[in-house]
Amino acid sequence: MEILNIKEVASYLHCSISLIRNLVRSGEIPYFRLGNRLFFKKETINFWISNNENKAGDTVERI
């Protein structure tokens, strides 16, 4: 199981860290916290992408 931090998940999704933070705040992207830090399971992100392709694309296009 690969764990990504916020910088790594932004790079993986080809978007900004601020977009990831907005998705976390709105509850749109799966994540977990350890202390004050955000982490993302890569397999969960892949599942999220496959189930939200249109929604994720819409979010990126609005920026």
Image: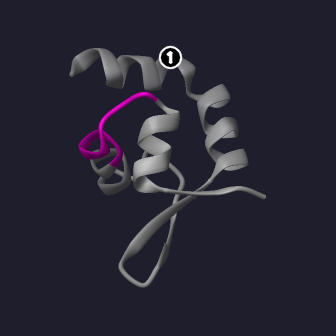
Q: Residue at x 30, y 36 (%)?
A: 16
Above or below, comparing residue 20 to residue 59 in the picture: below
Residue 53 in the figure: left or right of residue 56: right
Does residue 24 show up magenta in the picture?
A: no
Q: What range of the chain is rendered magenta?
A: 14-20
User: Where does the image place residue 2, in percent across and percent down from the top left?
Assistant: 71, 56
The amino acid pointed to by label 1 is: Asn
State the count of labels. 1
Residue at horizontal 30 percent and vertical 14 percent from the top:
61
Residue placed under numbered mark 1 in the picture: 54
Image height of 51 relative to 43, above or below: above
User: Looking at the image, which residue is at 40% across and 73% down?
Assistant: 37
Crowding at dot 1, Cα within 10 Å, few <14 / some 14-19 / many 20+, comes out as few
Q: Is residue 58 left or right of residue 40?
A: left
Residue 10 at x, y percent in the picture: 42, 41
The C terminus lies in quadrant: top left
